Image (cartoon, helix red, strand yellow):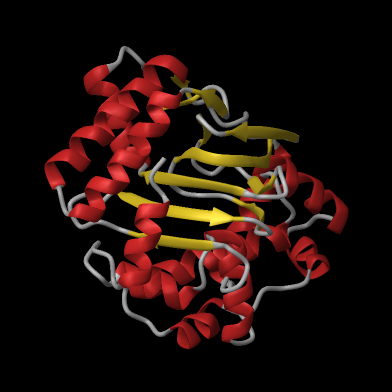
Amino acid sequence: MAGTGERARHWRYEALPDVDLLRARYVRKTFVRHTHEHFVIAGIADGVEVFRHHGSDVTVGAGALALVNPDTAHTGRAGVPEGWRYGALYPSPDLVAAIAAETTALRGTPGFVSPVLDDPHSVALVHRVLRAADEGNALAADTLLRVLVTRLLRSNGGPLPQRAVRTAGTLLAARARAVLEERMAGPPTLERLATDLGSSPFALLRAFRDAYGMPPHTWLTDARVRRARLLLDAGTAPAAAAVAVGFTDQPHLNRHFARIVGVPPGAYQRERGSGGRPAGRKNVQDARDGDP
């Protein structure tokens, strides 16, 4: 991202094992349609982000939060020429559920009702969590995170909608997904997959898109990047991870990884292996730039 004014740091702090952390400034960056296994709590410090969510473009500006529930397909891009600067927390569903059970009256699986919340105080809390993680202040990072999640659930929380009734279409999509997960490195064509499942290509395509918010080939790329992240976290070299998940080579992994995660796989792996502390002068500067 050199020369573009863009910068990003994606890392994990050992005192918050169930939370991924991101601080970034993007100008020309475009996130393709993808999902996260964790929640997304992104506090915009400057600029504007636009993201596609449940079929509509949603705009979020400075002092507001973008909130995305797990396994919800979405995109991301700049809404103004100067881009957007933000910090993001990605807490696991189990952590959010535990906080909800202790501090709210929510029942069922908790989640966020609206994808955008105008709340400058919560945006400041996001950046305070990131700053505490940078400084190695475990007590502050954990406390502020729990205060933030509680505040968001109380103001914008509700039970996540239950999965749709198991129709023939949802069952077909689930079977197709299972095949793609098993054959990730060598997936069949859409026609072959449909034939093996006793369907037609377009019927399978419609069922899969209805169930998962994206067509099978887009879902597969997203799933490959997710699995590559696990391999990188375990210490696998990016080139080996690329081949293991079915990308032709590392440049293909690099391109798709950056368009979904926000940083290249090499930078992602270096930061994740740094123990949660800034790895050098550039990252320290990025940490300062990320404060609202």
Closer to the camera in the image, 269 or 99: 269
**Position of residue 263 in the picture relative to residue 168 (left or right):** left
Residue that sits furthest to the top in the current view: 105
Residue 48 lies, in percent from the top left, at 63, 40
Task: Note whether residue 28 is visible.
Answer: yes
Please give the name of the residue rendered at 46% of the width and 87% of the height, measured from the top-left corner. 240
Screen quadrant of the N terminus: bottom right
Q: Is 94 situated above or below 226?
A: above
Please give the name of the residue rendered at 43% of the width and 15% of the height, measured from the top-left corner. 155
Q: Is 246 situated above or below 129?
A: below
Q: Image quadrant of residue 276?
A: bottom left
Residue that sits furthest to the left in the current view: 139
Closer to the camera in the image, 250 or 173: 250
**Position of residue 28 in the picture relative to residue 232 (left or right):** right
Please give the name of the residue rendered at 27% of the width and 36% of the height, measured from the top-left corner. 145
Screen quadrant of the C terminus: top left
Q: Is 215 situated above or below 59?
A: below
Q: Image quadrant of residue 171?
A: top right
Residue 168 lies, in percent from the top left, at 71, 40
Task: Note whether residue 161 is visible.
Answer: no
Please give the name of the residue rendered at 53% of the width and 47% of the height, measured from the top-left corner. 85
Q: Is 251 situated above or below 133?
A: below
